[in-house]
Image (spheres, rainbow, N blue to C red):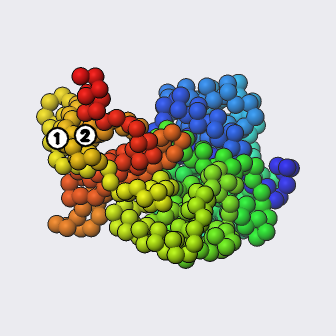
Amino acid sequence: MNTTSPEFVRIFDTTLRDGEQSPGCSMTPQQKVVMARALADLGVDIIETGFPASSQSDCEATAQIVRDLRHTTLAVLSRCLPGDIEASAKALEGAAKPRIHVFLSTSPLHREHKLRMSKEQVIESIGTHVAMARRYADDVEFSTEDGTRTEEDFLHEAVAVAIAAGATTVNIPDTLGYTTPEEIRSLFQRLIGTVPGAKDVIFSAHCHNDLGLAVANSLAAMEGGARQIECTINGIGERAGNAALEELAMALKVRNAFYDIDTRIDTRLLVPTSQLLQRLIGMPVQRNKAIVGQNAFAHESGIHQHGMLRNRNTYEIMNPSDVGWPDTKMVLGRHSGRAAVGHRLRALGYTMEDEQLDQVFAQFKALCEQQRVVEDDDLERLMTGGVTGQGYRLSSMTISDRGQRASAQVELSAPDGRKVSESALGDGPVDALFAALANATGVKLSLESYSVHSVGLGADAQGEATLSIHHDGVQYEGSGTSRDIIEASALAWLDVANRILRRNPGTPSANERQAATA
Ligand code: KIV
Ligand code: ZN
């Protein structure tokens, strides 16, 4: 692919800078190195590794990434201050493709209240500091912070000065996520059409998501002539975040006939890269997040599943494997129809007459009243006449969190009717609870994600706990609801453990293990 072609857009990833500086997203230098390698494999053109003048940790991370990645352009951020530019140049020493990224606010609000600088001072500072950065690097980007809220004639002047001083990329950030697609498209078109020297540099868009428009605005800026887009994995970034890389890449791929602009992104790595970031920073994406959310390719409603079984294009505009998911997920639950249940049973090797399917479907519906999702092992038990929906049930629990460590005691009724009682210590009440449940059931779960949220409002509010784990290559998700969130967590844990036990019926409980050793 020709990177100078007008039909090519550079992907500038700022997960490690704008993303990392937002609450809950910070990374250690080692984590940044791991993430940078994944971004390079993904095919991003430029990785912004940090803001060296602001932190020693960013200097360390950048120095390590500089040694590691020799084919990707590495950028670092600097204010219009000599010390910042020197720190950036130092952090990038030895880089194969270094870029110094200099920024200064141009909007009236920022000039007056943040910088306390006049227009003339801003213009002079841009010229001086871009020229200084050029003495350290051939590749210099200049960003007009809060550019979309800047008077257009002044923005025009600021961009012209940056180009004259040697900027090779000019970035117009929508710092507050305030613009709209039509505004930003025409702004880029006018700037590129009229600023002296604009045709010799790359114009870039950097859109924040305060109004949920970051991706739409980035695509519109591209229509206006931007050939670099700044974005982050999972859309992390200041406040509501930045434009999500995975959404941009797939919009350009799926709607290529419309945009006619390519990227170098290997889209099959989008989901693994997103999941790596989720694990590194401990921030899961919402289930219905486009492209990388658990539900992005999941279908539960009967009508949708029926359509999908006839032709997947009825309800899918992209193939899950194109973004790195193993396959479409047909979730069998309360909303599923007979056709989807029959299809799943056939896939499991069961052939049956219509009448038998009617009977199994009725049992399936009854089971859906007890559990949210019906898995393959539940269907197997329906087919083989096994009792489903039974397993360990929570009889009582006592939690204490007064000492240095929390303790939990649980009493369960086992599938055979016996009572099982176990206790454990943990780092907190939930940790102790899960350890006690593991002792009682003999099932060890290593959680991938665990969350609690409230369902309903006021006195009627219930806590819903959801957790997901991988066990023997199978993904399990469980949920539990109760007024008490600790009890909801216990129910969610048991939901998963019971599924695993149904798949592996020989697992001994603590009582059985004790009896065996007595
Ligand atoms: O949002 C913004 O304006 C920025 C600049 C520093 C590029 O992140
Ligand atoms: Zn930003």
Q: Residue at x 45, y 46 (%)?
A: 503
Q: Quadrant of residue 275?
A: top right
Work out which residue is located at the far top of the displayed protein and give it. Answer: 518
- For label 1, the residue is 399
Q: Nearer the viewer, residue 55 or 277?
A: 277
Q: Is 208 situated above or below 100?
A: below
Residue 91 placement, left or right of 457: right
Q: Is 285 situated above or below 303?
A: above
Q: How crowded is mark 1: few (under 14 residues within 10 Å), some or many (20 or more)?
A: some
Mark 2 or 1 closer to N-term?
1
Q: Indicate the position of residue 147 as horizontal and vertical percent values.
A: 58, 59
Q: Which mark is residue 345?
A: none
- For label 2, the residue is 433
Q: Quadrant of residue 515?
A: top left
Residue 357 visible in rendering: yes
Q: Indicate the position of residue 214 as horizontal and vertical percent values.
A: 57, 62
Q: Nearer the viewer, residue 10 or 400?
A: 400
Mark 2 near ligand 2 (CB under 8 Å)?
no
